[in-house]
Image: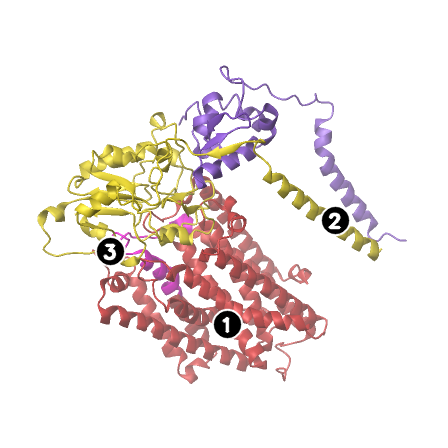
Chain colours: A yellow, B red, C purple
């Protein structure tokens, strides 16, 4: 009796193991035979995408609202009232933005507003802390998110020193104008974190980010690793600062003061 | 041995029924949270972790604290703890169950939880926290259950339980260290970004955890025939006292560093918690209550005559637990998120629904602890170990 | 050999078998399952891959497309016949299959599966409050 039960269990175990191996093997061969993948011919490529913002040109709530509207419309970002809101790009004053109170500042700078967005840091803490790689760093420097994989633990929000991330506390579609959705882009679901994606979906088809397009030249976007690029040219010609450089995250967004 | 949990006095059944009722009621609100999202909580874009994660953090400490009994017993052969060891281990099981519960209710997409295993990410401390917590649960279940079963059958404990018990001692330190690492490695959160945070966590765990355990054991003595070794209890109270002294000392180190250096980032959170900033002083009464109760508990615990007063001890322990809970279960999280990355203050207070869901998890933990303690005391009764009528065993 | 607690064991077995076989009893005598009629695209005869492949493997294909497009940044799919498609549910699949209710839902409802694609992706019919 004991002997046969032992053998039965062994057999059952082996069968289960076999089934696992078989199903794992099956998952590898999915796409049609002879298929291949590649880029769009129009794709914009870079080694390190970066953005330079001329705050002399976009330095008011109104001008920044134009950028935010373009961004939020392109990505179906809901407009939620209250403190559980979601924003990819928004305006803030000098002290809020740069964490360095300066007394007796020049009046223009004191009243200026600054567009804030995800910095797509080189050493991004959000990428470091994400337990599922739902936030990950692409080879071109963009800190991207896979909303399919996010479990909503919000560790990335605690990790981000720039407050760039928003959590979908509720169903975002309740706060979207469903008639005016961008049908080329998804919405998000309740329970995941989201943030600016440097318009990776537009770069893939040769278009500049939505905010850059709406900025009439105040925002410059390009490859930081290419000395001949537009961003490098602007950086050479102007005094720029980045947010919280002391933290060593190496932000990819520069501000012309 | 589980059958021992099925037979009890009417009072036992009423208590179990009461806990089940709380769990049922709480799960109704949790269903609401599943359908509507975490919007039913008081959390916000700026304070993105709240009461749930704070309770998780506090309870990891409670789980780790069993080691204050297990370590002297196994490493120093301190036999007076013999009858307490099983309770330390079973308390740890209840606490880890609550920890896991608080994580589950906190995440936005719990049905995708296993992504942490499907895409293991060693650079995330949360991954390691998952590993150490589950490991600690398994270790305590294996060691606690096996040793109790052997006691019941008057058999010596198998050798491997000793190996696992030694492992679990080291492991207990790791669970709270890793939980502290969740916080202290984040750039830009000054209140957490301090090398002493893990040490503070351990110190506060090693006073508050054994204090809770001792309170529960005193309660167990009231409702069962179990009687703990008096000297053992006195020693545990001494350990709690030392740990609380260290805990307060570590906090004062933080205060010195922040205010002598005068660096705004270091001072800001502490000022918000104890004095208020920009008209926001939501936590000030709580933090000063914690200070008063914490110092009060030290006054009652340090003089041996007061500490050994068995009538007074429960009160000293209770106010110690309240003080450490305010520090770690409220101040740590809210102070960590305030000021926000924009140097603003974002007040947070848990909503009623959030508290009901938390009560559900606490009831679940209480249920686990009740059942496990019931089994342990029944076995001790059966074997005649550490009983009230009996002369204290000469171990 | 004696069967201890025989009454209880046999009662238990009967209850178990009863529950286990209930679906068969419930469906006995009913008409056989017929695959639902799907509304196929009018202007397009061929999908990304063969009909058979799509019917059985579209979920795995979408899974791979998602990882390639999102994580690897490779957005174009060249099928076995050399034809190129953008890997996008909203921009490619739903441009031909313009009706989720008449296409996706038909089989999904029958199979009692509710994939969460549409929690985020916008269905071609648009969304209503």
Q: What separation in Å lies between label 1 and label 2 (alpha carbons)?
A: 47 Å
Image coordinates of residue B338 in percent, x first then y, are 29, 56
Residue furthest toward the top?
C42
Label 3 SS: loop
Span shown in magenta: B325-354
Q: Mark 1 falls within which chain?
A: B
- The disc placed on residue B214 is 1
The residue lying furthest to the right in this view is C1
Mark 1 vs 3: CB contact within 8 A? no
- Report, in whole angstroms, how far the alpha carbon at label 1 lies from the one at label 3: 37 Å
* Residue C124 sits in quarter: top left
Cα distance in 3D space between marks 3 and 2: 64 Å
Residue holding disc 2:
A12
**For mark 2, does the 10 Å Cα neighbourhood hold few (<14), some (14 to 19), or many (20 or more) residues?**
few
Q: Is residue A21 magenta?
A: no
Crowding around mark 1 (Cα neighbors within 10 Å: few <14, some 14 to 19, many 20+) is many
Q: Are marks 1 and 2 on the same chain?
A: no
Residue B299: % across, % down: 36, 78
Q: Is the residue marked by circle 3 packed among few (<14), some (14-19), or many (20+) residues within 10 Å?
A: some
């Amino acid at each position: 009796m004991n002997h046969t039960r032992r053998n039965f269990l062994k057999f059952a175990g082996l069968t289960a193991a076999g089934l696992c191996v078989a199903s794992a093997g099956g998952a590898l061969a999915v796409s049609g035979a002879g298929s291949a993948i590649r880029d769009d011919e129009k794709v914009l490529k870079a080694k390190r995408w970066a953005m330079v913002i001329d705050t002399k040109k976009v330095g008011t709530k109104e001008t920044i609202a134009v950028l935010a509207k373009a961004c939020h419309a392109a990505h179906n970002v809901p407009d939620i009232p209250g403190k559980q809101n979601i924003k990819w790009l928004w305006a803030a004053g000098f002290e809020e933005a740069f964490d360095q109170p300066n007394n007796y500042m020049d009046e223009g700078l004191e009243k200026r507003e600054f567009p804030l967005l995800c910095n797509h840091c080189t050493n991004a803490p959000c990428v470091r802390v994400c337990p599922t790689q739902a936030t990950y760093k692409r080879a071109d420097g963009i800190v991207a998110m896979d909303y399919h994989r996010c479990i909503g633990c919000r560790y990335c929000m605690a990790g981000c020193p720039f407050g760039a991330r928003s959590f979908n506390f509720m169903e975002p579609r309740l706060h979207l104008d469903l008639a005016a959705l961008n049908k080329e882009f998804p919405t998000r679901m309740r329970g995941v974190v989201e943030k600016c994606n440097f318009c990776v979906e537009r770069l893939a088809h040769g278009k500049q980010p939505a905010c850059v397009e709406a900025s009439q030249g105040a925002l410059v976007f390009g490859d930081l690793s290419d000395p001949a690029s537009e961003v490098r040219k602007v950086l050479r010609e102007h005094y720029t600062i980045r947010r919280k450089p002391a933290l060593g995250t190496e932000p990819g967004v520069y501000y012309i003061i | 041995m589980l059958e021992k949990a099925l037979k009890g006095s009417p009072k036992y059944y009423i208590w179990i029924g009461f806990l089940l009722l709380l769990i049922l009621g709480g799960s109704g609100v949790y269903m609401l949270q599943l359908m509507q999202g975490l919007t039913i909580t008081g959390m916000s874009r700026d304070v993105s972790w709240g009461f749930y994660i704070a309770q998780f953090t506090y309870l990891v400490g409670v789980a780790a604290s069993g080691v204050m009994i297990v370590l002297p017993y196994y490493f120093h052969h301190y036999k007076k703890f013999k009858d307490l060891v099983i309770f330390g281990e079973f308390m740890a099981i209840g606490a880890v169950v609550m920890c896991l519960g608080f994580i589950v209710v906190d995440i936005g997409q719990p049905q995708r939880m296993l992504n942490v295993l499907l895409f293991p990410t060693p650079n995330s401390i949360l991954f390691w926290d998952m590993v150490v917590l589950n490991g600690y649960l398994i270790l305590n279940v294996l060691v606690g259950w096996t040793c109790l079963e052997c006691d019941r059958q008057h058999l010596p404990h198998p050798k491997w339980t000793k190996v696992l018990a030694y492992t679990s001692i080291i492991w207990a330190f790791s669970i709270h260290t890793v939980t502290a690492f969740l916080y202290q490695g984040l750039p830009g959160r000054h209140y957490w970004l301090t090398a002493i945070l893990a040490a503070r966590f351990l110190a506060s765990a090693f006073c508050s955890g054994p204090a809770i355990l001792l309170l529960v054991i005193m309660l167990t003595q009231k409702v069962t025939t179990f009687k703990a070794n008096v000297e053992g209890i006195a020693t545990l109270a001494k350990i709690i006292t030392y740990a609380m002294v260290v805990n307060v000392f570590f906090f004062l180190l933080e205060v010195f560093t922040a205010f002598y250096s005068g660096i705004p980032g270091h001072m800001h959170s502490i000022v918000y918690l104890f004095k208020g900033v920009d008209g926001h002083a939501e936590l000030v009464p709580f933090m000063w209550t914690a200070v008063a109760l914490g110092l009060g508990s030290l006054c009652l615990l340090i003089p041996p005559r007061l500490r050994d007063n068995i009538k007074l001890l429960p009160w000293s322990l209770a106010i110690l637990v309240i003080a450490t809970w305010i520090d770690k279960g409220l101040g740590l999280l809210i102070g960590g998120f305030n000021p926000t990355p924009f140097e603003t203050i974002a007040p947070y207070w848990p909503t009623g629904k959030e508290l009901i869901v938390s009560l559900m998890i606490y009831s679940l933990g209480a249920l686990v602890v009740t059942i496990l303690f019931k089994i342990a005391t029944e076995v001790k009764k059966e074997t005649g170990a550490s009983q009230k009528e009996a002369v204290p065993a000469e171990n | 050999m004696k069967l201890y607690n025989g009454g209880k064991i046999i009662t238990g077995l009967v209850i178990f078998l009863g529950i286990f076989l209930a679906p068969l009893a419930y469906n006995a005598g009913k008409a056989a399952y017929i695959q639902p009629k799907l509304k196929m695209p009018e202007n397009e005869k061929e999908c990304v891959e063969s009909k058979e492949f799509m019917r059985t493997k579209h979920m795995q294909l979408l899974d791979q497309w998602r990882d390639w497009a999102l994580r690897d940044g490779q957005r174009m799919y060249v099928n076995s016949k050399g034809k190129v498609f953008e890997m996008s549910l909203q921009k490619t699949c739903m441009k031909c299959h313009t009706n989720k209710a008449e296409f996706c839902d038909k089989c999904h409802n029958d199979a009692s599966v509710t994939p969460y694609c549409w929690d985020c992706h916008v269905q071609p019919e648009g969304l209503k409050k």
